[in-house]
Image: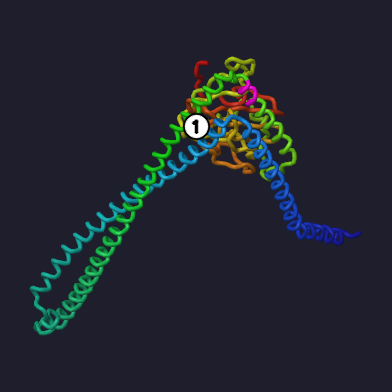
Amino acid sequence: MSTTRLGKLFVGAIVACLVAAPPLLAQNKTVKEKELKTVLRKIEKLKQSIDVKEDSKSQYIKQLKSIEGKIGKLNQEIRSIGKKITVKKKELTTLRETRLEHQRKLSQETDYLAEQVYAAFTLGRQEKVKLLFSQQDPQSLQRSLVYYQYFSNARVDLINDVQHNIDKILETEQLIQQARKDLEQSQQALNQQKKELKQDLGKRKSIIASLDKQLKQQGGSLSRLEGEAKQLQELIKSIEEIFVDAPESEISQRAFAELKGKLAWPVKGKLRRLFGRNKPLSNLRWQGVMIEAPEGQHVQAIFHGRIAFADWLRGMGNLIIIDHGNSYLSLYGHNEALFKTAGEWVEAGEVIGSIGSSGGQKNPGLYFEIRRKGKPQNPTNWCKSSNSFASG
């Protein structure tokens, strides 16, 4: 077979591959979308099964879940309104500066116009006619007429500029009034949300007190801890089973294991070395760490992955679990609010929630775990030593 014929066959094969590629890519995309929908349905069923189990628990647990969910939403709305108010205040400041600039220009232009009007008045009403009969020589007369035309045109332009700045001032004034109105409405909404939040925080405090009293009366602290640990373990096991079938990310990422000791902490704060220690009044061990941080501070994903769970869980409050592939999971508990939902992809450093005290905690902070094949890993061995350590 000749070289020319081989070349033609080679080119033909490449063209055939290129023609076939789009349908193949579309087919792969459709398959992945179906797989993702299947995974999301499984996660939803898992959440429903957890809710059914919760229904059989203490009424205070259900009340706590409900009130903390509401508190999380209120805090999100308060921050959102706060951002709008900040934007509106900046907008109002800019508009006021714009108005001052137009007023300054108008003042200058009206002064110039007054001078020109006075000059025109001193020449009389028929200044151009006077020039024509001024008995000047033709060349001087021609120059005077040109100067007069320039003077007249400049006066018209100045009048137009004055009118333009007056219009701009009136327009800016309307915008200022609207911005003030929007600002007042946002401030009223903010005050209302804060009032509701204060009431709900009072209800939450009462629910936690009732729950603690019930546990003391029934001597159920240990059984509660054991029940919460068992539920979390079952949840993790179910997630691992579900995510075996989950479609992989199309973006090539470094393996989670390669970054051991180099990962950033999910939040800056004081770290309590709890991992491996016994929990109070039990033989159960801490499987993660608690990071003390201000309420509302952003919580960030430590690595690329897919949100496997984002919901309220007894003992953990508002919990997010991220699947990082290769049987690695990271858990973020006691969030005030969750900003992601199950099935979403996230990148390292992306905001996924905010610091809170959900799950019945008395102080704000983040409970953080890393797991491999369901087994807890010491987070301090995986993350950089950038956080300060608290005693205990």
- x 17%, y 64%: residue: 112
Judge left or right: residue 237 versus residue 71. Answer: right
Residue 265 sits in which quadrant? top right
Q: Nearer the viewer, residue 81 or 211?
A: 211
Residue 62 image point, x, y percent: 56, 34
Mark 1 surroundings within 10 Å by alpha-carbon count, few (fewer than 14), some (14 through 19), many (20 or more): many
Classified by dominant secondary structure, the portion drawn in magenta counts as helix
Judge left or right: residue 382 versus residue 64. Answer: right
The magenta segment: 223-228
Q: Is residue 189 above or below residue 227?
A: below
- x 18%, y 76%: residue: 148
Q: What residue does disc 1 label?
A: 356
Q: Is residue 225 magenta?
A: yes
Secondary structure state at the residue bearing disc 1: loop
Q: Is residue 308 magenta?
A: no
Judge left or right: residue 109 versus residue 172. Answer: left
Q: Is residue 89 above or below residue 298?
A: below
Residue 153 sits in which quadrant? bottom left
Residue 23 sits in which quadrant? bottom right
Mark 1 belongs to which amino acid?
Gly
